[in-house]
Amino acid sequence: METVRVGLAERAYRIEIGAGTIDDPQLFAPYLAGRRAAVVTNEVVAPLYLERLARTLQAAGARTDSIVLPDGERTKEWGTLERVFDWLLAERIGRDAVLIALGGGVIGDLAGFAAAVYQRGVPFVQVPTTLLAQVDSSVGGKTGINHPRGKNMVGAFHQPLAVISDIATLDTLPDRELRAGVAEVIKHGFALDAGFAGWLDGHLEQLLARDRAALAHAVRRSCVLKAEIVARDERESGPRAMLNFGHTFGHAIEAALGFGVWLHGEAVAAGMVMAAELSVRLGVLAPADAMRLRALLERAGLPVFVPAISARQLLDSMRGDKKAEAGRLRFVLLSSPGQSLLRGDVDDATVIEAMAACIKPSARLAVPS
Amino acid sequence: METVRVGLAERAYRIEIGAGTIDDPQLFAPYLAGRRAAVVTNEVVAPLYLERLARTLQAAGARTDSIVLPDGERTKEWGTLERVFDWLLAERIGRDAVLIALGGGVIGDLAGFAAAVYQRGVPFVQVPTTLLAQVDSSVGGKTGINHPRGKNMVGAFHQPLAVISDIATLDTLPDRELRAGVAEVIKHGFALDAGFAGWLDGHLEQLLARDRAALAHAVRRSCVLKAEIVARDERESGPRAMLNFGHTFGHAIEAALGFGVWLHGEAVAAGMVMAAELSVRLGVLAPADAMRLRALLERAGLPVFVPAISARQLLDSMRGDKKAEAGRLRFVLLSSPGQSLLRGDVDDATVIEAMAACIKPSARLAVPS
């Protein structure tokens, strides 16, 4: 087992990474002393892992209750949160409880936000069961729900007490979701760490074959890179923006296609291609490096073209995104694999051209699973 | 004008108290540099003060928009919050905005919570226009909404950038609301400061007659007392509980009567009588001091008896309240005027007897306005 520390002073916490962690009461016990555990999960994950985790939490001394929510991005909205509050109150689970998020990014964001605002805040532990959640969304304290007018528009920064990642739970992850998680792993390499980008070039097939050592390395390296940035910039006023490489475009793609049509990681993959294309057009990235990113994403079975949507519509959508301060768009660009930079002075025409180069009416709307 | 400082390190802020403060752009300017102002108010306050405040904010350099919500405690729920988010997003008001809460406790709690979670948090300024908000709810960073199963069950600690209290706005406050605010002032005296409790004995009629000097003193003294406690215990793990004197009973009374039948301050008044009665029965308070508190509340026209509700029902309701850690009820008791203490070992029978002594089937359900 490996441990990554997120250095946030009194909100510091540990990320435990290994196979079989959800069966180890000693990993959970430090967070549960005398407390009730309230597990939030969904209908896909519950049959696979809920009973095992509940047994572990009980062995760690916690009275344990659980709620099983529907699966999918649509779950990440107020109505579901309301169900969670209703359940917590009906069970008389108070401020002395620890919420446990068992599932992927949707469950982590939703349960984390529930923990942030239930009775003005209760602690929570992330138990991510998807690659995307293990390498990205469970780390850093961003929680929230979607609004009809935009993704993650309502939320809070609420750091978990701990993240306990079980690599073995990735065995049951559908291929399509595994690849969507690989998109965020590739993001970490290309935006932040040339060495890791190189490792990915050499180990992509092992990752996709779910080789445990390769998965553990990818999760650990991603967590180290993300933790280092979060520790410097918890609330995204500066360097944390680099983690949004591909995300401004990606969110707009998700909104244009309709949330849930593509997985988040798939939209981020196409978004990274757009960001690299923009970087080339602005003269900051060599075309060969953009090709290298695109080739890696294609090898991972991720979309690198977007089906027929208007580039203008994407631009309008980006302006409504919360990452646009005072209506001004800021882009995370690449200067080389592992090196990113932030630019706020890009003219609309260049952005539209870069996006248009990545829009193909014939591109697959449905990503094969 | 007087200034009270809330000492919370990087979240420290000033409370400005005076007559005519909402007309002074210089008071607002430090919080608005280059930002948009988004004013949240209600249909009662808007016709009285919105135009004046908007003029002040514009004079301070901020592009200003506003939303006018319905009046009343029922407004403090998710549906209203959703309207605020929808408006903010439609107006493309981003993370660079400052929310301004113009109104009483409901608007302050609601707009403060909107600020806490909109795009994971934007800053806000409290402009309280009721006595209750000026002496209590605008200070300390508690924000939130109600849930059908309980008051303030969903919320956040989110400190304002500043509180700007205009004593002159109390001129238009209905008498009943003024008295409800006086209940919280009395709470501050009796729970925390014998000298202030004595001052209230001597100046209650001036307060009720809206004498500006008396009001300014009551607001300032309340803010000083509350700020001192909040600075020591921002998230209510210890001494801040003393500010809940009368509130555990008060919340149960509000729930039993139906939210909105009594004003919060009215329920707190009857709740303080119950807490004092319990203190006498536990032998920690002299009966004469309990009488003194009751007499002062009666002089203020506040309810000291609760109409026909079952004491058992109140107890059940209190157990569901978030102040009950692990299902155990903790009570803020009085040992003398100005001295309170926390007790977690009170048996149910004594609590029920103390409440029953304050329940009168003939007590007025409708408080005259």
Image (cartoon, coloured by chain):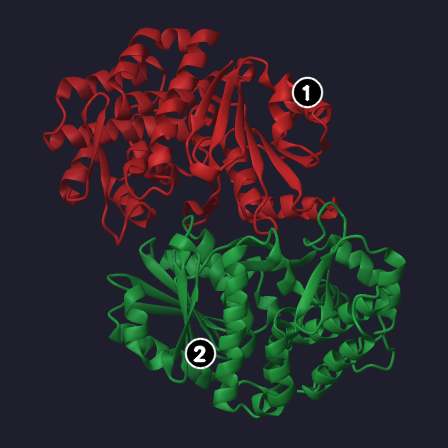
Chain colours: A red, B green
In the displayed structure, B254 sits above or below A260; it is below
Q: Residue at x 62, y 28 (%)?
A: A30
**Is A24 left, or right, of A170 in this rendering?**
right
| Pointer 2 chain | B
Disc nearest the viewer among 2 and 1: 1
In the displayed structure, A321 sits above or below B189; it is above
Residue type at mark 2: give it: Ala
Q: Residue at x 33, y 59 (%)?
A: B97
Which corner quadrant of the image does residue A47 belong to? top right
Which corner quadrant of the image does residue B351 belong to? bottom right
| Pointer 1 chain | A
Q: Quadrant of the N terminus of chain B?
A: bottom left
Give the label on residue A52, or none.
1
SS at badge 1: helix
Q: Quadrant of the C terminus of chain B?
A: bottom right
Q: Would you name the residue on which mark 2 appears?
A: B46
